Image (tube, helix red, strand yellow):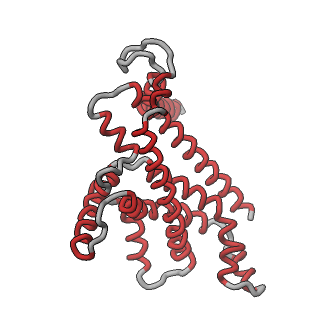
Amino acid sequence: MRISNTFNNITKSILFIILVFLYLPILVLIIYSFNESKLVTIWGGFSTKWYSELFENTQVISSAWLSTWIAATTATISVVLGTLAAITLTRLGNFKGRTLFSGLIAAPIIMPEIITGFSLLLLYINLYEFIGWPSERGSITIIISHVTVCIAFVTIVVQARLRQFDIRLEEAAQDLGATPLKVLLTITLPIIFPAIVSAWLLAFVLSFDDLVIASFTSGTGYTTLPMLIYSKVRLGVSPDINALASIMLITIGVIASFSIWLELRGSENAKTV
């Protein structure tokens, strides 16, 4: 019993140290975003002036709107394609090519982002040489690139939900004369809707937060918010970057928390159906 208690205490201590190591720098960053001083390492008093200056910075606002539009479009397309892929994998059984199809869906999760971004860059260059498209790399190429990655995460989330609820509900609807399309619209989609919303939020965060792939597939004049932050940090950390990073952290944290809450609520509802 003593050995077990000692092991539990050591495990809890290690977990606490890891959590402090991960989240203490984030807490310090948020605190210093309210620093009056221009020196990020010296506390000069409480002030919100860096947030005011941030919202007056047209470059930051432009990059934020670009990132938001790209993320929303990416999430929407990814949800449609990922949901169809999840339904295919869970409802069509062991069809020919299933292993290859599921492997291609999951590949972007395993593939390093730098390899994915570089391969997509080469793809766009070769496409331009053969068919003349894309004439420039911008928001469209970024969206296509993000969709190729986000589909995998959407498929996993929706597929997990599809495996939870009772398939006999769909079979009963078909026995009563409902067409497969009507079953999909009136039975399947309403039940997995929380998972779809959760997958959309996850894809939105992944796209909004991406730096590596966007750096490879964007062109001149198309600077996303993570790219802007990275370019500014290379010149030195300033208080306005702390403010910008704090806003991004809080926004993404709220979206992620809401996504997890939806996922848990959907799982509970699926069990009661």
Q: How many marks overall?
A: 0
In-front residue for pair 148/56: 56
Question: Can residue 57 be seen at all in this image of the molecule?
Answer: yes
| Residue 51 location (% of width, % of height) | 49, 28
In the image, taking residue 137 as reference, residue 148 lies left or right, namely right
Residue 247: image location, x then y, percent: 50, 35
Which residue sits at x=42%, y=68%?
105
Query: Would you identify the image quadrant in which residue 115 lies?
Result: bottom left
Q: Residue at x 41, y 75 (%)?
A: 101
User: Whole-percent x and y of residue 206?
Assistant: 45, 52
Determine whether 15 is above or below 173 in the image.
Answer: above
Q: Quadrant of the N terminus?
A: top right
Give me the residue at 29% from left, 51% from top: 220
Quarter assignment of residue 229: top left
Residue 57 drawn above or below residue 157: above
Residue 10 seen in render? no
* Foreground pick, 130 / 30: 130
Pick out the residue farthest to the top.
44
Using the image as rendered, state which of residue 262 and residue 95 is in the foreground. 262
Q: Position of residue 125 (x, y in %)?
A: 23, 66
Residue depicted at x 74% and y 65%: 273
158 in relation to 98, above or below: above
Nearer-the-camera pick, 143 or 4:
143
